[in-house]
Image (tube, rainbow, N blue to C red):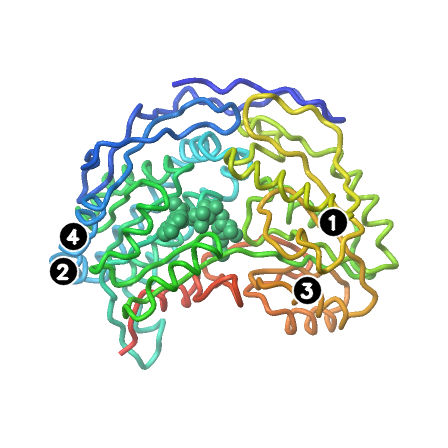
Amino acid sequence: MNKTKTLKFDTNWSYSPAPESIDYIELKDRYGLFIDGNFTSSKGGNYFDTINPANEEKLSEVSEANEKDVDKAVQAARQAYEKVWSKMKPSERGKYIFRIARIIQEQAREFAVIESLDGGKPIRESRDIDIPLAAAHFFYYAGWADKLDYAFPGRSTKSLGVAGQIIPWNFPLLMAAWKIAPALAAGNTVVLKPAETTPLTALKLAEVIREADVPPGVVNIITGGGETGKMLVKHPDVNKVAFTGSTEVGKFIMKTLAGSGKRYTLELGGKAANIIFEDAAINQAVEGIVDAIFFNQGHVCCAGSRLYVQESVAKEVISKLKDRMNTLVIGDPLDKNTDIGAINSRMQLEKICKYVDIGKKEGGSIYQPSCTLPEKGFWYVPTLFADVSQSHRIVQEEIFGPVLAIQTFRTVDEVISKANNTPYGLSGGVWTDKGSKLFKVTKEIRAGVIWANTFNKFDPGSPFGGYKESGIGREGGVEGLHSYVELV
Ligand code: NAD
C-alpha cells in the first residue's frame, strides 16, 4: 500500500511531525460486496477507486453494486430475517451486537487510521471521536436488545423486517453504527450502502461482523454511488429506509417512497446558529466556535456555520477568533497535531470554492489565515465572512466546509428570529452565563439539538435529528429504537 507523505504547511506554529504509523494497516487491493456473510464480486463486474484525499493516491478499489447485486443483498437480508434473526432470543441478538462493539474497540487504531486515510479527517478526530462513539453505539443498543418492552412501557414491539440504509462520507463508521446497531437490536436485518468516497471502514466493519459470527445475511454491506442507493430505496422488499445525507437527496427519497407504505427516517443537512451573548465566557466560546466549524474541515451536518455575536462583544470575539485561526494546524490527517485535515473530495472542494466566491460577490468581508497548501490533495483554509446579512446565500445554504458567516445582534428576540430564519433546523449552540437566557433561547430555536456552553457533544443515549428541511425522525437513544419497531 502507498504511504502518505508528511505534508508541510506554513503555519505560525510549528510542531515536530507526529504521524500515526500506517505500517500495520492492511488494505486489500480490491473489495467485493459483503452479501450473505461473504465478500463477492458484483454481477456487473465494475469497480471504482477510493483515494486518499490528502494526496490523491489510490487506496483500493471497490465493487459497484448493480440492480442484481442490490436484489441479492436484500434477499439475503430477508432470508436471514425470516429464518434466523427475528426468531432469535433477544438476549442472543444482544450478544452478537456486544461482540461487534468489543471487536471495534480492539481494532480501534486500525479503524481510526483507515478512516483518516480514506476520508481526510484528522486522526485526532477519528481516534478520539468517531471510532469510540461507533463502539459506544453498538454497546448502547446491545443493551436494549432484550429490554425492548421496557423501552416502550405498556406496549410490545414488532420488528419491521429489512432496513435499507444509506450513509454519507463525513462520519463513515459512526454513521454505519448509528444505522446498524439500533436496527439489529430491534430485530431487523440490514443492507447498508456507504458513501462512494469513504467505503473502507464500512468494509472493515463487514470483516468485524464476520469475525463476530453474526449469522450470514443479517448485515449486508454493498458499495456504489447514488444509483446503487436509488436501487436500494426502490427495492420492493425493503421495509424501512434510513438515510443520512443531503437535503436534496432526502427530498428525492421522500418523493420516491410516497405511497409505498415503507417506513423512513431522513437525517439531512444543517446550517446551525452558534450564538454568543455578551455575558459568555469569551475564550471558551471562541474555542467552541472553532470546534463547531473548523475542526473536521466543517464536514459536519451540525456544524456551527452561522455565528451570531452580541454587538457589545463582537470586536473582541472576532479578533480572538482570527488569532485562534492563525494557530490552527492544517495538514496531514495522520499527524496527531493536525486540527484541520483534507477536504473529502474534489467535488466537495469545488463546492466550497463556489460558495466562497458567492460570499465575496455578495459583499462579505473575508478573512483567511495565510498558509501554503500543497498542490496535491484537496485542501481549504479556515475562512470567515463578516459583513453578511441574513439573506446572503452563504448564510442560508449549507456549504459543508470550513466557512463561517458572522453577524451581530442586540436582543434575545432578534437572535432567535435570525437563528430560525433558514430552511434548516438540525442543531445550534448558545453561550451565556445566564440560565434564564439558555432556557429561553434553547426553547425557541427550532432545532433537534442545541448545545449550551459547548458544541458537538454526542452520546448514544441522546436522540439526534432535524426539524424542517433537516429531516424526519430521530437516531440515537430510545427514539432511535422507535424508528426500527412497530408498537403493538
Ligand atoms: P449525498 O446526499 O450526496 O449522499 C449521501 C449518500 O446517499 C451517499 O451514500 C450517496 O451515494 C447516496 N445517494 C446519492 N444520491 C442518491 C439517490 N438518488 N438515492 C439514494 N441514495 C443516494 O450527501 P453527502 O454529500 O454524501 O453528505 C453530506 C450531506 O449529509 C450534508 O448535507 C450533511 O449535512 C448531511 N449529513 C447529515 C447528517 C445528519 O445526521 N443529519 C449527518 C451527516 C451528514
Q: Which label is found at residue 82?
A: 2
Q: Which mark is in front, 4 or 2?
A: 4
Question: Amino acid under label 2?
Answer: Glu
The CA distance from mark 4 to mark 2 is: 10 Å
Element class at badge 1: loop
Q: Which label is found at residue 303?
A: none
Element class at badge 3: helix
Mark 3 sits near ligand 1, with its Cβ under 8 Å away: no
Q: Which mark is in front, 4 or 1?
A: 1
Q: Which label is found at residue 419?
A: 3
Q: Residues within 10 Å of mark 1 (few under 14, many from 20)?
A: some
Q: Which label is found at residue 75?
A: 4
Q: Quadrant of the C terminus?
A: bottom left
Q: Examine the rendered structure and indicate whether residue 195 appears above or below residue 190.
A: above
Is 306 displayed left or right of 400 in the figure? right
Element class at badge 4: helix
**Can you tell which quarter of the image residue 441 is in?**
bottom right
Q: Earlier in the sequence, mark 4 or mark 3?
A: 4
Q: Residue at point 39% right, 30% down?
A: 50
Q: Earlier in the sequence, mark 1 or mark 2?
A: 2
Q: Examine the rendered structure and indicate whether residue 55 appears above or below residue 422.
A: above
Spot occupied by residue 208 in the image (x, y as percentages of width and height): 29, 39
The CA distance from mark 4 to mark 3 is: 45 Å
Name the residue carrying label 1: 362
Q: Which mark is in front, 2 or 3?
A: 3
Q: Residues within 10 Å of mark 4 (few under 14, many from 20)?
A: some
Name the residue nearer the viewer: 91 or 350.
350
**Can you tell which quarter of the image residue 422 is in?**
bottom right
Question: Amino acid under label 3?
Answer: Ala
- Residue at the outermost front position: 361
Q: Earlier in the sequence, mark 2 or mark 3?
A: 2
